[in-house]
Image (cartoon, grey):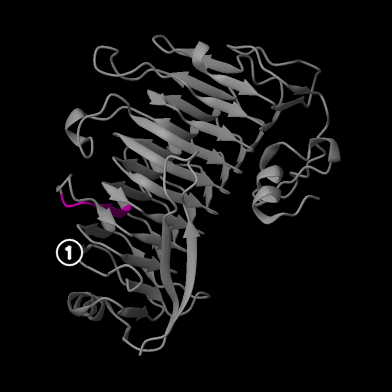
Amino acid sequence: MTQFLMKSVDIGLFRGLLPAIVFAFPLSVQSGEINVSDAAGLRNAVASAQPGTTILLAPGNYGAGFNFTNVRGTPGRPVVIEGASPDELPLFSGGKEAIHLSDCNHLVLRNLKVSGCSANGINCDDGGSFDTPSEGMVFDGITITDIGPEGNCDGIKLSGLKNFLVTDCRFNGWGGAGIDMVGCREGVIKNSQFTGKEGFSQTTGIQAKGGTEKIRISGNFFHDAGARAINLGGSTGNRYFRPALRDFEAKDLEVLGNHFVGSEAALAYATSVDCVVRHNTIIHPRKWVFRILQERSLDDFQACRNGVFEENLIVFDKRVGTFVNVGEGTKPETFTIRGNAWFCSDDTRRPALPVEEADGIYQIDPILDISDVPAVKILSKNPQLKSVGAHAYLAERTGVKD
């Protein structure tokens, strides 16, 4: 009997909107393993894979252009495509796309490297069957570099996924989004790094649009990851919405415990509804702290509304003139801004905000060490600020208070 060491990720707790959803996938498989060392061997192994199969890839360059359709694992018994050695990742390089997954369920990609693709690194979709999304997809420990370099070229493109996980991935240099979601729901993106690279256009680090809802983005690090490090919404052609055209681009997204360094703005609420940004650390945005935008017609879409921005730690300087960029057609008066800590590093300015902030904290130096950026954790050393910023989220999750 195959023995599994299980790792579970709870992606519920969206303010009571979702039940607890648990991913379980094998860390180690004692049987059902196929060892592969070249592109032909990989294609053959995937073609014959059954629930519980693990395909172990030896180090080497496998090229690009892999198209896998209808690969089906089951809950608790996924199909796994995994680098055999986490210290020497198998490389997928060149071509338009490294790997395209279509209409697959319960498939895990782990410990792979993707580089130098002209369109997308990894593209995963529902095969055009909008009512039957791909479920249980996991992207774990993937390194993606040098995608594009310009235009709508994404590190990982996800269209029509449900109950998915992206964890411990690294993105360095892309054209459009590090991760671009269209019509995705009930997923988690966590513990990953998005680092912009000179010569790449990098529009955004993570984008959630096309009717995307109930996504948690937590514990990630963004360093110059596009004009908007996270885009909560966007502008999508109507025919691409999944499962059907909605009156919002994004809804019920949570951005929790992330670090942002640089970018024009840490994030934008863009034709989005009921999105929460809490316990993040934002350091030296170059133009705005965040944006409230309406990028779709009010004839067909709700006005951007009901956003929450609370208990974040923001360090800013003279480059921030307008703290919150408010676009026409939005409803900034419906936003809640509460309990954030604001520190001006080159003056004593207080933020001018579109609504009055309750319980704001001003000009308490967080004592951050950012000399070794990019670093995954930039924690405040000031005990007066222990309840705000990414440190507070980490403490809340681990029970460590100091």
* The magenta segment: 121-127
Q: Position of residue 257 (x, y in %)?
A: 61, 43
Q: Is residue 259 above or below residue 3?
A: above
Per the image, the residue denoted by label 1 is 70
Residue 242 visible in the picture:
yes
Residue found at the very far left of the displayed protein: 129
- Give residue 177's quadrant in the image: top left
- Give residue 181's quadrant in the image: top left
Question: Residue at the location (59% across, 43% down)?
Answer: 258
Q: Is residue 37 above or below residue 65?
A: below
Q: Is residue 31 above or below residue 315?
A: below
Q: Main secondary structure of the magenta part?
A: strand
**Secondary element at image label 1:** loop
Q: Residue type at mark 1?
A: Asn
Determine if the magenta segment contains residue 27: no
Is 231 placed left or right of 237 in the picture? right
Q: Nearer the viewer, residue 27 or 214?
A: 214
Is 27 placed left or right of 386 in the picture? left
Q: Nearer the viewer, residue 170 or 389?
A: 389
Q: Nearer the viewer, residue 170 or 239?
A: 239
Question: Residue at the location (63% across, 14% down)?
Answer: 321
